Amino acid sequence: LTEEQQRVLEKVYRNSEELLGLIDNVLCLTSLNTGDATVVQEEFELVTAIKEVLKQYGNTLDTKGVKLVTQLPERVRIVSDRVKVDRIVRNLLNNAAKFTTAGQVTVKLRESSDRRAARLEIIDTGIGIERDQVEMMFEAFKQRDDSVRREFSGLGLGLTVARKLADLLGGKLDLQSEQGVGTHVTLTLPNEL
């Protein structure tokens, strides 16, 4: 393939991945809203799961000149629904990658001292959100304003789905943000080990 063909192919791939993510979020939100969502618990390595998702967004950030900083322990084993945890992490990283055009995205993971919970933090230097709009960002199909929707695309489902999934898994998703400074998202998941 020529360089131009490779560039076009990469763009088609990225766009198809984005479309697939949107469809997955719509389907996931539908099952959550109808009460049809089930939890399939399994023991898995959370650090490995996070690293797999990070691979997808590392190139995107690198292309934009955004630094990816990770602070991950060697291992954190957890019992939870891996598919749903992957969806949460993917949605949170997607937002950080999408809305950060300069600076860095930091991903931190730690386990509580009693190993009964894991805490994932994703901190970005993106566009941020006004403090009075933070809770609104968890409503389906909401974005900061129309200019954000036009510039960054998306449906405004990522945070909605992530919080509902965190709740379903017995966890908690918190968001702190300041417009023009960035966003700090904290996901706490119980560990059923």
Image: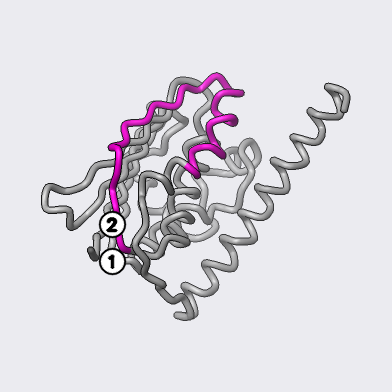
The location of residue 117, given as percent across then percent down, is 21, 55
Residue appearing at x 82%, y 32% in the figure: 8
Q: Amino acid at mark 2?
A: Leu
Judge whether 40 appears above or below 186 on screen. below
**Amino acid under disc 1:** Gly
Is 69 a magenta residue? yes
Q: Which of the two labelled residues, at mark 1 and mark 2, occupies the earlier sequence position?
A: 1
At which x and y percent is residue 142?
51, 54
Residue nearest the observer in this picture, 63 or 174: 63
Q: Find disc 2 in the rendering and name its residue.
A: 189
**Label 1 SS:** loop
Q: Which residue is mark 1?
A: 170
In the depicted structure, whether residue 42 falls above or below residue 159:
below
Magenta segment: does it hold 73?
Answer: yes
Q: How many marks?
A: 2
Find out whether the residues at labels 1 and 2 contact each other: C-beta distance under 8 Å. yes
Determine whether the residue tagged by mark 2 lies in a helix, strand or loop: strand
Which quadrant is home to the N terminus? top right
* Residue lying at the far left of the rendered structure: 114
Give, as a single range, the part of the protein colored magenta. 52-79
Residue nearer the viewer, 67 or 50 = 50
Q: Is residue 180 visible?
A: no
Circle 2 crowding by C-alpha within 10 Å: few under 14, some 14–19, many from 20: many
Q: Quadrant of residue 14?
A: top right
